[in-house]
Amino acid sequence: MSSSVSRSRAAHGAAPALKIWDISPAVDEQAAVFPGDAAYSQKLHFALSPGCPVNVNTLTFSPHTGAHADAPMHYANGAPAIGAVDLLPYLGPCRVIHCLDCGPLVEPQHIAHALADLPPRVLLRTAAAASQSWISFTAIAPATLALLATKNIALIGIDTPSVDPATSQDLPSHHLLLEHDLRVLENLVLDDVPEGDYELIALPLKLTQADASPVRAVLRELPGKGTGKP
């Protein structure tokens, strides 16, 4: 919305539009996935032509493509699929915490400066998206997740492919999510988001048998707060 439209809305008693940050990476044939996972592919199934009124594509991809929400069944047999989880954790006040240059793991000391009056959702910005690799990336130390669990959070998000290192076989941070019934968002893009508080909107699809779902994750400025102010 242009500034002139915003001024006009304000002059007539309507609040200016709140700023929105798109924190989802692009999803196409170039989208990175874990080695061995299904790559994104797309082909035209119906083509717009004199005998067909529409274009319809067939898509094939892993549910862990792009920004995505893991379901408990991703790391625990018999646990809920993504279509069965409560949507509330994916919608509402959140805090973006900068822990840049933290190395291979986000440790408790990297987030200690931003834990006062913590909202129910926390997103960790660790590095620029262009610098992330799906083979080596920053994950979350179990001690950090255990600390956040004491703050009564509902969701943790990170701007890397996983909360556990790529080489992990026992997935301790994923299992802490399960233990504390926390939801998770992975592979976010937080490059342009100042540290502070926002409204998170990142709803997964109602995939009733899936271990994860892509999300279109966005942050919205909180009314009266201004950009990033806690």
Image (tube, helix red, strand yellow):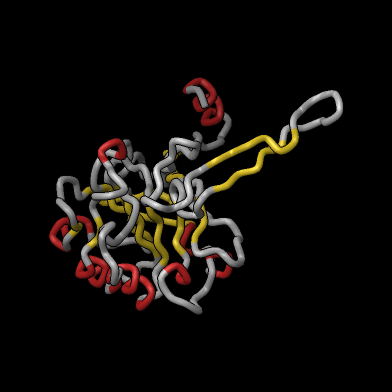
- In the rendered view, would you say 62 is above or below 155? above
Q: Is residue 223 visible?
A: no
> Total number of numbered labels?
0
Give the quadrant of residue 225. top left
- In the rendered view, would you say 8 is above or below 197? above
- In the rendered view, would you say 167 is above or below 84? above
Q: Nearer the viewer, residue 207 or 191?
A: 207
Q: Is residue 116 shown left or right of residue 27?
A: left
Taking the view exactly as shown, the residue that stands out farthest to the top is: 4
Q: Position of residue 131 (x, y in %)?
A: 25, 38
Q: Nearer the viewer, residue 116 or 169?
A: 169
Q: Is residue 89 visible?
A: yes
Q: Position of residue 53 (x, y in %)?
A: 82, 30
At a point 46% along the width and 58% down the height, the residue shown is: 69
At a point 38% along the width and 54% down the height, the residue shown is: 186
Give the quadrant of residue 31. top left
Q: Position of residue 210 (x, y in %)?
A: 55, 63
Taking the view exactly as shown, the residue that stands out farthest to the front is: 36
At a point 15% along the width and 51% down the height, the residue shown is: 102
Q: Nearer the viewer, residue 140 or 45?
A: 45
Q: Position of residue 48 (x, y in %)?
A: 76, 28
At a point 47% along the width and 71% down the height, the residue shown is: 73
Taking the view exactly as shown, the residue that stands out farthest to the right is: 51
